[in-house]
Amino acid sequence: MNSPPPRESAELLVGPEQNGRRLDAALKALSGLSWERARKAIATGKVSIDGDTTSDGARAVRTGMRLRIDERAPGKRAEKLRELTIVHLDASLVVVEKPAGVSTIPFGDESREEQHQTLDALVRTTLSRMLGARGRPELGVVQRLDKETSGLIVFARTMAAKKSLTQQLRLHTVHRRYLALAHGYVQGGTIRSQLVANRGDGLRGSIANPKAGQLAVTHVEPLEPLAGATLCACRLETGRTHQIRIHLSESGNPLLGERVYVRRYPGPILPAPRVMLHAAELGFRHPANERELRFESEPPEDFRERLAALRSTRY
C-alpha cells in the first residue's frame, strides 16, 4: 500500500511509546509514511528535531521532542549540489568530489527535477557557468560511484579522453583507494571472487563457479580498530558494481550504514546515516600527455563524525 503524500509541513510530538526509537522508525509511526518516504525525507534534509535539521535516521528520539517535516526546505541535497568541489579541470577531463546522496547518472526512474540533480547534470551546469559556454557541454561518464558513496570521480571532456580513461580502467591501471567503516574486526588481505547479479538469494554477490560472473579483486588494509568496527582502506583492482560492499559483507564485515548486504551479519548493527564509504584517492595517466595524476580527498563531515563517535567509545 502506498503511503499518503506528505503535507508541505507537519509537526509531530514524540510520545512515551516512541521514546528511545530511531528517528526513521518514529517518523514512520507518527506520520504514516512508508519506510522509503520517511528515510528519504530525513536523508534529504526535510526533517528537523526541535528546530535542528538532521540527516541521521539512526538518531534516538526522546519523549517531548518535536519532529518537523518541511517539504519546502531546500534540503541537504540542494546544499550539497551548490557546494560541488572541482578538484581538477583542463581541456580533457574534470575531477570532482561527489557528495553522498547524489546519483552519478540518472537511471530512468527519477522525476524531472531529480534528473537535473544527478552529478553529471550538475557538472555540466557548473562547467557552463565557469566557462561561459552555451549549450550542453560535452561530458563523458567513465566511472560511477554508488549514490551513497562520497569522494573523487573523473569525467572525460573529449571522446579521446573517454577512450583513454576507459582503457585504463579496463587494464586496471587506475588507482582507486577508498576509506570505509566496517563492522567488526577487519583482517587485511586480498579478496578475489566471481560476482554475479544474483548469487541465489536475490542479491548481487559471489559464486564458486570460476567460469561464471565477473572477476572482482579488492585489496583490504585495516587502518584502525574501533568500538565494534574497523576503519579500513580498500583498493580496487577491478571496479564491479557494489564490489567493496559485497566483498566486505561476505567476509563478515558489512559497512556501517549498509542496508542491502547486511542480512547475514550476526552482531549488533551500528548506526550510520549512510553507507560509510568514501573514494579518497584517484590516480591515472592524463589522456593527452601521459602525465601521472594523483588526487586525494578527505572524508566528508558525516563520515568524520561517525569515526569520532566510534573512537570516543573505543574498548
Image: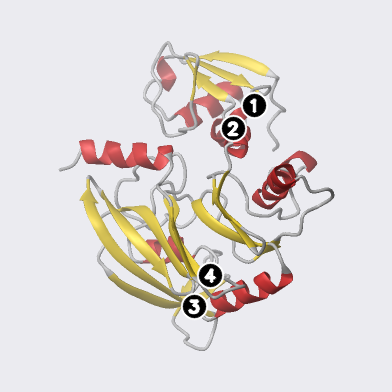
Residue 185 appears anywhere in the view: no
What is the residue that sits farthest to the front in this orientation?
289
Of residues 13 and 256, the one nearer the viewer is 256
The residue drawn where x is 68% and y is 52% is 120
Mark 1 packing: few (<14 Cα in 10 Å), some, or many (20+)?
few
**3D distance between C-alphas at marks 2 and 4:** 30 Å
Whether residue 63 is situated above or below residue 180 in the rendered picture = above
Tags 1 and 2 touching, CB below 8 Å: yes
Tags 2 and 4 touching, CB below 8 Å: no
The amino acid type, in three-letter code, at marker 4 is Arg
What sort of colour scheme is used for the picture?
A: secondary structure
The residue labelled by disc 3 is 172
The residue labelled by disc 1 is 74
**3D distance between C-alphas at marks 4 and 1:** 34 Å
The residue labelled by disc 2 is 79
Which image quarter is the N terminus in?
top right
The amino acid type, in three-letter code, at marker 3 is His
The residue drawn where x is 26% and y is 68% is 188
Whether residue 204 is situated above or below residue 153 in the rendered picture = below
Q: Earlier in the sequence, mark 2 or mark 4?
A: 2
**3D distance between C-alphas at marks 1 and 2:** 7 Å
Of residues 202 and 280, the one nearer the viewer is 280
The amino acid type, in three-letter code, at marker 2 is Glu
> Could you say whether the residue bearing mark 1 is in a helix, strand or loop?
loop
Percent across and percent down for residue 227 are 22, 45
Numbered tag placed on residue 240 in the rendering? 4
Percent across and percent down for residue 182 are 34, 53
Residue depth check, mark 4 versus mark 1: number of the one nearer the observer:
1
The residue drawn where x is 65% and y is 64% is 92
